[in-house]
Each structure stands twice: as structure tokens, then as C-alpha cells.
Image (cartoon, rainbow, N blue to C red):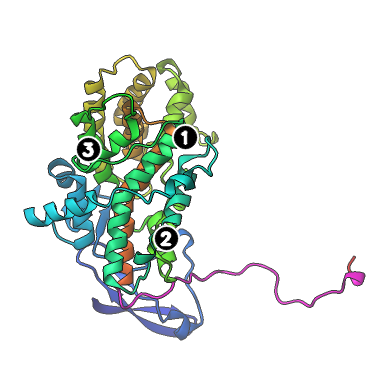
Amino acid sequence: MTAHTTSLKVGDQVVDLPVKEGTIGPAVVDIGKLYAQTGMFTYDPGFTSTAACESKITYIDGDEGVLLYRGYPIEQLAEHGDFLESCYLLLYGELPTPTQKHDFDYRVTRHTMVHEQMMRFFQGFRRDAHPMAVMVASVGAMSAFYHDSTDISDPYQRMVASMRMIAKMPTLAAMAYKYSIGQPFVYPKNDLDYTSNFLRMCFAVPCEEYKVNPVLSRALDRIFILHADHEQNASTSTVRLAGSSGANPFACIAAGIACLWGPAHGGANEAALQMLQEIGSVDNIPKYVAKAKDKNDPFRLMGFGHRVYKNYDPRAKIMQKTCHEVLNELGIKDDPLLDVAIELERIALSDPYFIEKKLYPNIDFYSGITLKAMGFPNDMFTVLFALARTVGWIGQWKEMIEDPGQRIGRPRQLYTGEPKRDYVPMAQRR
């Protein structure tokens, strides 16, 4: 909503630019007509000071350590709700009634199986393929299996595609894991809840019955809630940019998964665990902490601080509690990796350097430890992140498609190459 205008002086010209204000958060200067009025663009590498869209889904206040899904604090949703409830909230804007929740759970559960021919699709991958490579390909390939839900102009098809991806992502993720370790695929079961079903598909084998540990299921469900959406991050922006061209929803989510694969984004929890393994023992911690404090040393502690949160990551507080619940349930007390993690956590919360720099343990620090304890290998961490973030991507994609003011993404640039020059024939080049 436009509240007032602000003036910008460009040379001798003064232009008035609209200022728009949201319900909470900083106001924005609308520069949509800046080029037409002045012949100039703005320059903002990484778009860190640019709002590329209007959204009603997620809000972050990095200075205060706040994360809201549709206005609800993440702490309340993780403590009192389950993942599918958060999915419903992100998609439809309100918490479901008991009847709506039952219907939503039923629809998701009845869409968990994937097309049987996808089994053969998986066999084309090498056994040592990274599960994220498998996920990018298999999710993109869903558009080849489900032609009846790729018309983005049809609200019903958009809904069907959304339900299919939320429901089938755990099945595909479990298949990627099973394929990488050479075990047979496990079909989903309709009498299990979303997260318990996923754990069973990952860890059950045909030769014996698998019983889901409710503590682990609840912990993983909470991890999914914490990762479900995070405003306009790199992968979400990728999904929106891909979707702005009119690409089908499966292709858009595959693009988001590809972006999430980067170590600076979804691979951060994997990187945090690798760092703990590199440190090796508590005795080595002082040396690595000194390296982290040395401005001339390229080493940095992974899993500490956050680009957005300048305060404590609100998700990390929940993840810390969840992490210790899982470790206590599994009786893990003598793991040297855990010893390193606990000591690093103590230092980060008490050392003046870390406190001054606000390098608090973030969600990636705790989630890596937790997922390892559950039995997931490092290269599955980002896959689980993609599984959880799917609903956020879909919600953002759906909002973008339904926004009448949305246009195809077309960032500008500051060109610093050669000016115009004439072609030189080969014989005349020296």
C-alpha cells in the first residue's frame, strides 16, 4: 500500500518515488519507473536491499530473531503443531479446522506413491550418485509422468501438482537414499503419519518389521517445520524466477532443489558436520577457535552466525532442545563428534569474541548432529532440507502465479566489458 513518496536527486533532476509499507517490517521505495524517468538502474549485488515481490507468507526480523509463518511464531508452530498443519498454513493462509486438517492429511497420504515406471528411472543413476543429483532429476522428471497437472493457468491443476509434490517428495527422497546404499525401495504405508512414513521408507528392510520411534519421528517432524519456509532466500527466489517464465511447477521445484544444493545454502548443515569431523577431538578446539578469530586465516566455523539473523536464530533454540532429546533417546553419550559439538556450543555462548560478533550456533549446527544421530549420512542432509522446503517453495510459487502484478523476472546489470568495436578478419589479427 502506497503511503507517501520520497525524492531522489539525479544530477539536476528530482524524481518522486512511491514508498510502500507492509503490515510489519521496513518500508520499500518503488523504483519500478526509475529507468523511464532517469535512464538509470540501481545496483544491488545479491539483491540484499531489494524487494523483488510482495508476499503474505513468511516474515523475518533478523535483528530481533523473529520468524513468522503467516503471522504465527515458529516456536509456537514447532511446539504445538505438526508439519502437515504448517503445510496447510503456508499454502492456504490459515490454520486448519479439525475437518480441514483431516481432509488435508488424507489427501497427502493418498498421494505418496510414485508412478511405478519411476523405479526404472532411478536405475539409470550410478550407485554412488549424490542423492541431491538424483532429487533434481527425479523431481524434474515428474512433469513427464504427471501431464495432468502442469497447466499453471488451471487452479485445480495447480492444487493437484502442489499436493503431489508435498506427498511424493518423502517417497522420492527415501528412494534416493535406498538406491545409494543398495537396498530395495520401501513403499509408503497409509496408516502412518507423514514423518513416520518417511522414516520407515528410509530405514525399513523387507526381512524384518520396522517400528518407528515416536521421539525420532516427532524430532524429524519438528525439523521439517523449522525448514518449511524462510522468506525470499536463494532457492525460493530461484523457484519464483523460474516460475515467472511460466515453467511447469515440477521444473520450478527442481530448480529450487538445484539451488539448495549449494554449500552456502542448503549444504550448510552438512558443512557444519564436516567441520566437526575435521576438528576431531575436544583437544583440537582451541587451535580451530584461534584460526576462526584470525582475520588472515581463511578457516571459519560452520554452523555459527547467520546472514539474516543478527540475533539468536529462533529455529536454533528449538533445534537445540530437539537435538538433546534425540541424543538422550538414543543413549549417545560417548561420541567424540558430540563432545566437540557440545564444547564448541559452550564456547560460542560464553566467549566474548563470539558474543560480540553474534556468532551464535544456528539451526545447521544442531540439525547436522541430530540427523547423524538418527542414522542419516551427510549427503542426505540437504535432501531432507529440500523435502521440508518443498511446501514453502510451492506456497511462494502459488502466490506468485496468482499475483496479477507479477511479471517475468529480468534483473539488470552494470556492464563493464568492451565498448562497441568492429569485427576484424582472421588474416588481419595479430
The answer to if 414 sits in the magenta stretch is: yes
Q: Which residue is nearer to you in this view: 230 or 159? A: 159
Regarding mark 1 in the picture, which secondary structure is present there? helix
Q: Disc 2 and disc 1: Cα gap in Å?
A: 23 Å
Q: Amino acid at mark 1?
A: Ser
Q: Amino acid at mark 2?
A: Ser
246 or 369, nearer to the observer: 246
Identify whether 36 is placed above or below 95. Answer: below
Query: What x and y, as percent, mark residue 258?
Result: 47, 51
Residue 271 sits inside the magenta stretch: no
Mark 1 or mark 3: whose residue is earlier in sequence: 1
User: Which residue is depicted at the point 33% across and 71% down?
Assistant: 401
The reply, left or right, for residue 193 in relation to residue 384 is left
- Disc 1 to disc 3, how far (Cα)? 31 Å
Marker disc for residue 143: 2
Q: Quadrant of the N terminus?
A: bottom left
Q: Secondary structure at mark 2?
A: helix
Residue 10 in the image: state x and y as whole percent: 47, 80
Span of residues in magenta: 403-428
Residue 313's place in the image compared with 235, above or below, is above
SS class, disc 3: helix
Q: Dot 1 surroundings within 10 Å: few (below 14), some, or many (20 or more)?
A: some
Q: Which mark is residue 45?
A: none
Residue at numbered disc 1: 180
Residue sticking out furthest to the left: 98
Name the main secondary structure of what is drawn in magenta.
loop
Disc on res. 318: 3
Does residue 272 appear in the picture of this structure? yes
Quarter of the image with the C terminus in it: bottom right
